[in-house]
Amino acid sequence: MSRERKKRKPMAEINVVPYIDVMLVLMVVFMITAPLLTEGVSVELPQLTAKPVKVDETEALVVSIKADGSYYVNLGGSAEKPVQLAKIGTQVSKIIRAKPATQVLVRGDKMVPYGKVVELMALLQKSGVASVGLITEPEK
């Protein structure tokens, strides 16, 4: 007795389940990486419940912005004359090259426009400062 084999027709359907799995994985990857791609100045913002950070004022470089928009660079607590924004970058880059561990702090008047502070922080970042601290007054 011989058995006859039935001929199978080729299946004309495409199985889309693996493609859906790949699409979902890619979507998750893009959802996670998209917020990380935004550019900006890295800042550690103070919190109300945070304890004050101990800073060696004699070794810290403090850049101040007055309410009128004038900039001052104080190194080790010595008062300076007003400095133009363009000159701050060269001064800070020289100091950072000489002492890379120097802390850089920004002290801005509360009436200064936010854009002035961000502009200063971007300049400091371009000058080689890895992180910039913000000086604030404790809440009364």
Image (cartoon, rainbow, N blue to C red):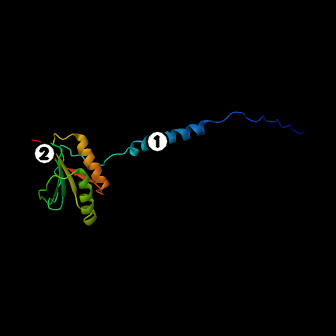
Label 1 secondary element: helix
Label 2 secondary element: loop
* Coordinates of residue 111 in the picture (x, y in percent): 16, 39
In the image, 37: left or right of 64? Answer: right
Q: Quadrant of the C terminus?
A: top left
* Coordinates of residue 60 in the picture (x, y in percent): 18, 59
Residue bearing the label numbered 1 = 30
Q: Do we see residue 43 in this rendering?
A: no
In space, the residues marked 2 and 1 are separated at their CA atoms by 40 Å
Q: Amino acid at mark 2?
A: Pro
For this rendering, which residue is in front, 78 or 68? Answer: 68
Residue bearing the label numbered 2 = 138
In the image, 101: left or right of 12? Answer: left
Answer few, some or many: residues within 10 Å of disc 2's Cα (few below 14, many 20 plus, some between 14 and 19): few
What residue lies at 12% left-to-right and 45% top-to-bottom?
138
Dot 2 and dot 1 residues touching (CB under 8 Å): no
Q: Do we see residue 16 in this rendering?
A: yes
Answer few, some or many: residues within 10 Å of disc 1's Cα (few below 14, many 20 plus, some between 14 and 19): few
The single residue placed furthest to the left in the displayed view is 140
Is 54 above or below relative to 26? below
For this rendering, which residue is in front, 3 or 33? Answer: 33
What residue lies at 76% left-to-right and 36% top-to-bottom?
10
* Coordinates of residue 109 in the picture (x, y in percent): 15, 44
Give the number of callouts.
2
First in sequence: mark 2 or mark 1?
Answer: 1
Residue 111: mark: none
